[in-house]
């Protein structure tokens, strides 16, 4: 992954959701996996619930590339959920030869980054499953509440290019849809305040800076997490187009301070609402600060003039201080 990971500009909208029925065990009951997106080979096409994604079918700039996470299959690689015991999530990546991939490059200290979020952009988790000898990745399911979740597999197959594949997973139960929180210039989590500055415009490279403080004092001893002082994921409301970026500089390079500021070079593909998730580690605990950003809004992206902070909810959806596996 490059320091400044970019999603090239494209026309908004989504092609229909293409349902594929995979049995993947149970969490709180049977779990349904829906393969959303399309690929050049027609993988994942079928009858699905189009209500969870907007219509799409677009061309991504001159290169014709889609953003990460919109496809279940790309460049011959396919994300395939497999049967798992209750409370577990398991999947394989199959390669161009149709066989499970077993060779992966280590990227930011891990061979696989699994990111999940509900389609209402609550419940974000970034975890790291374990690879079995048969090419199956397994982990205690991070999808811990009813709803339709998007699961992103972020990886680099040995000898290949970095890829992000995505699949929808339905966890049954009584669904309480959560409205998108209002934009704000700061967020609080576990007693930490994280301030966001920067005014991104669609299709332009912009620096976002997040400043971490605690009890009014700047945090100047952030700890490396996955080889960096912070990790930022952005998901676009609607299709959940995926942008995963890493900060400018790295620990031990002789020029990057361990806080309080962590800066990211980003490019948002279009105007609209995005949810940002910043992972940072301090005193041995990884925490996630969450923001809503309206890209392309006049006067900036970090919310109302009063700058009231948002507080991460306490019920497991964006839980303050959650651990990362």
Image (cartoon, grey):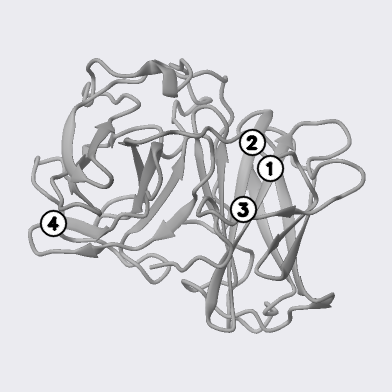
Say whether residue 215 is left or right of residue 46: right
Callout in the foreground (1, 3): 3
Q: Residues within 10 Å of mark 3 (few under 14, many from 20)?
A: some
- Residue beneath label 4, please? 135
On the image, the x and y values in percent for residue 116 come to 42, 48
Q: x, y (%) of residue 253?
A: 60, 81
Give the residue drawn at x 73%, y 53%.
207
Mark toward the start of the polypeptide (4 vs 2): 4
* Quarter-of-image position of residue 314: bottom right
Q: Image check: 263 left or right of 58? A: right
- Spatial distance from mark 1 to mark 3, Cα to Cα? 14 Å
> In this picture, is 19 found above or below 105?
above
- Judging by the rendered image, the residue that carries numbered circle 2 is 180
Q: Quadrant of the N terminus?
A: bottom left
Name which of mark 1 and mark 3 comes first in the sequence.
Answer: 1
Point 44% across, 58% down: residue: 126
């Amino acid at each position: 992954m490059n320091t400044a990971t970019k999603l090239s500009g494209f026309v908004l909208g989504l092609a229909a959701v293409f349902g594929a029925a995979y049995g993947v065990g149970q969490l709180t009951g049977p779990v349904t996996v829906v393969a959303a997106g399309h690929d050049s080979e027609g993988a994942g096409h079928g009858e699905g619930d189009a209500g969870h994604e907007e219509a799409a079918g677009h061309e991504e700039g001159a290169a014709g590339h889609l953003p990460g996470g919109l496809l279940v299959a790309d460049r011959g690689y396919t994300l395939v959920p497999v049967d798992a015991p209750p409370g577990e999530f398991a999947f394989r990546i199959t390669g161009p030869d149709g066989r499970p991939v077993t060779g992966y490059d280590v990227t930011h200290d891990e061979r696989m980054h699994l990111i999940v979020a509900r389609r209402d952009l609550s419940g974000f988790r970034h975890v790291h499953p374990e690879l079995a000898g048969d090419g199956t990745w397994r982990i205690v399911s991070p999808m811990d509440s009813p709803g339709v979740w998007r699961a992103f597999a972020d990886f680099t197959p040995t000898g290949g290019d970095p890829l992000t594949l995505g699949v929808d997973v339905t966890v049954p139960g009584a669904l309480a849809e959560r409205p998108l929180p209002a934009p704000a210039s700061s967020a609080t989590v576990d007693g930490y305040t994280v301030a966001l500055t920067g005014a991104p415009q669609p299709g332009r490279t912009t620096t976002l800076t997040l400043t971490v403080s605690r009890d009014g004092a700047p945090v100047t001893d952030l700890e490396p997490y996955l080889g960096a002082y912070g990790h930022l994921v952005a998901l676009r409301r609607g299709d959940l187009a995926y942008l995963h970026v890493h900060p400018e500089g790295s620990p031990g390079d002789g020029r990057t301070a361990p806080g309080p500021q962590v800066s990211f070079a980003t490019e948002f593909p279009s105007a609209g609402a995005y949810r940002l998730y910043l992972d940072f580690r301090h005193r041995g605990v990884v925490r996630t600060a969450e923001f809503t950003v309206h890209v392309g809004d006049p006067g900036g992206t970090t919310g109302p003039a009063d700058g009231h902070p948002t507080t991460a909810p306490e019920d497991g959806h964006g839980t303050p201080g959650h651990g990362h596996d």
